[in-house]
Amino acid sequence: MSDAYVPHEFQYSSADHQAGTAVAGMWLFLATEVLFFGGLFLCWIYARTQNLAGFDAGARETELWIGTLNTGILLTSSLVYSTGVAFARIGDNRRLVQCCLGAIGLGLAFLVLKFGLEWSDDFAKHLWPVGPDFKFTGPIAGGARLFYVFYFIGTGLHGVHMVVGVFLVAMIAWRARRGEFSPAYTTPVEVVGMYWSFVDVVWIILYPLIYLIGRS
Amino acid sequence: MSTTVVVETAELERSYLTDKVSIASWLLATDHKRIAILYLGSITFFFFIGGFAAALVRLNLLVPEGLIPSAETYNRLFTTHGVIMVWFFLVPAVPVTLGNFILPLMLGARDLAFPRLNLISWYLFMAGGAVELYALFIGGVDTGWTFYPPLSSTFSQGHVVLAVLGVFISGFSSIATGLNFIVTIHRLRAPGMTWYKMPIFVWSLYSTSVIFVLATPVLAITLLLLAFERIFRIGVFDPAIGGDPILFQHMFWFYSHPAVYIMILPGFGVISEIMPAFCRRRLFGYKFVAWASVSIAVISFFVWGHHMFVSGQSLYASVVFSLLSYAVAVPSAIKVFNWLGTMHKGYIRFDAPMLYALGFIGLFTIGGLTGLFVAALAADVHLTQTYFIVAHFHYVMVGGMVTAFFAGLHYWWPKITGRMYPEMWGRAGALIIFLGFNVTFAPQFLLGYLGMPRRYHSYPPDFQVLNVLSSAGATILAAGYLLPLFYLTWSLFRGERAPANPWGATGLEWQTPSPPPAKNFASTPVVTEPPYTYPPPELVQNRV
């Protein structure tokens, strides 16, 4: 580790002080995200208990293989990015850039599968819950509509977070390419990594809620 | 509180107000003090918009059949009043102005942890406010500030989506502020500033911020679900497809009851600063007051169901919510008793901040105690949705919170602007507001007890005398609120120059010049003494 001087903002006493504060801020931000998605999941699970048959029928229409593949892709992208963080800590900006590009590629693959393939498939199968031509009819139609309201809102919000994450990782790649990071200064790399992993955590709860529960 | 000597050169350094003077240097300011000023201007603007709507509401209620021809217009007016006052004045008021300005100074810090995030929070607030004002001016909403479905999702004729969007956006400014405060308090305390050396105002802002950070996201997702339902006419709160409108009420009040404490806790903090300073006495029971703030914040998350006693929720749930609501009274009472304990045998001075603070204690006590009436299950069934509720929460929110805001504004005005406000006008303002407030809202307790429902455009003629009394009080109150607008603005240009510590108060904010230099302190302060080291020795000798 080199002892290179790292500049810090005037309100902090040292670069370490600033780095620790940034990490604390990101943890707290993620806590707000937990409450945000937590509210959604609470409503989802409550609505499910009230409309079991409709939710189960809705869940059976989802594309299990896309969801499962996407779970693998997303977790792999976090693994790749975390490897990049490790490279950043030893000052290897070149490999950090490669890892960022790998994570971005996997993230984009997720988005293409989710929205390019799965959503358009859902629309083609009349699973968009609004309007008269919804796939389901009869007593379970209401519950199935409700399931797809949650499905589109949940995956949509997760997708927005993914897009933001892709931009953030791209920013890290850009800064790494300019050689901005060193073993003494990796804060932005770590903070973006926390966010990127959090997006996984949300998916890990969405995945069973959408594809697994009630499928059998 | 501190032994730091602010070096002489700091006096020569230019203040944060004169450091840079271009318009851009204000609109792109990351200095917490300048952002506080931006916020102060913004919330003052919203306060008078909300107040104007309230004036029209009181005007309408002068006669039993209502002066405003249409009930729909009346509904939109009281909704405008509620939405603007709750989300664009009461929730942000003390934290983003006084808190933003004073918190880093109290901690001995040079700024908040994330100055740019602080600026972003102001822009988010203004963006939300602009959307909200647009929604209100193109016709408004008639749902009340609570946006209950199915009225808001299906039947309302107003611009619900835009109104909800405005609140949604401004919510992120709350989250940003709360996050910034918590991280700052954890990470940027000056050397020696241990948790028990922090002023109570910091403790109360910390508790407030916890609620900002943990409750606001739940409101955000709830409003998002509501907007979806409004746009697509199908959604989570729609019973036609198996959804549940009561679920909205649970989610909404999970945020909005803690939000009540977002509004009042910073007020508690302000009063806890003013009492020791104007009684020249150490704050009685410091640790109890500090932990009372935290415990109010914690309990506040478990009482939301008391807004839903008549919604059809389980009676067992109601009993538990009722019990927990009573529990909030304990830390609240601890605070009131400790303020009174601080006054006991104090060397009391009746300057304007103290008059406002005393008014706060009286009005908040009435608001708090009537809260116990409506926390009681049986009493609430009679009183719910009546003017008793309106009077109760105005005693807490306006009599309490707004009075505390004015108390703090006068107390720190010399520090913020470098000018003294005119003392006689300040005292007159405090008395007129106290008088006007009571004449406005005390009759509403009686009206509610007699059974007058809230949110109605007309009422039976029997209620007219009390309604006229209330409207008459509102004119006094309006005069009381306009008065500080004029004399504080006057003092900006003509007020006497303020010394660094006009009140002889403890606290790091008084140890730097008024107005403070751009980076707050010439050298980082070192704290060795506990807070509130009153009385000053010369006072004690004089008394003996």
Image (cartoon, coloured by chain):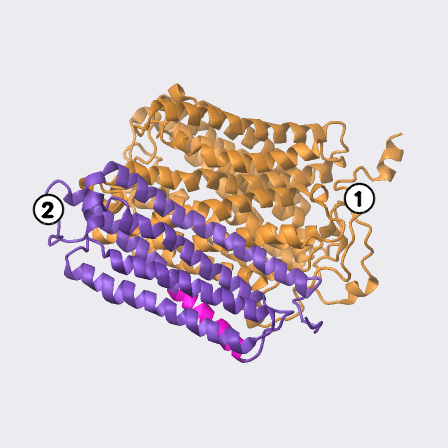
Chain colours: A purple, B orange
Binning the other alpha carbons within 10 Å of mark 1 as few (below 14), some (14 to 19) or many (20 upward) gives few
Vertical order, B518 against B56 (above or below): below
Type of the residue with mark 1: Glu
- Element class at badge 1: loop
Magenta residues, dominant SS class: helix
Residue B337, horizontal then vertical, whole percent? 64, 27
Residue A114, horizontal then vertical, whole percent? 28, 63
Residue B204, horizontal then vertical, whole percent? 60, 42
Q: Chain of mark 2?
A: A
Based on the displayed image, in which of its 4 quarters is residue B354 positioned? top right
Which residue bears the numbered disc 1?
A: B529
Type of the residue with mark 2: Thr
Which residue bears the numbered disc 2?
A: A137
Q: Is residue A89 magenta?
A: no
Where does the N terminus of chain A fall, quadrant-wise?
bottom right
Can see residue B177?
A: no
Where does the C terminus of chain A fall, quadrant-wise?
top left
Q: Is residue A170 magenta?
A: yes
Can see residue A190?
A: yes
Vertical order, B256 against A17 (above or below): above
Q: Nearer the viewer, residue B470 or A79?
A: A79
The residue shown at (37%, 55%) is A203
Number of numbered callouts drawn:
2
Q: Chain of mark 1?
A: B
- Kindly identify which numbered label has been placed on residue B10: none
Residue B203, horizontal then vertical, whole percent? 63, 42
**Residues shaded magenta:** A163-177
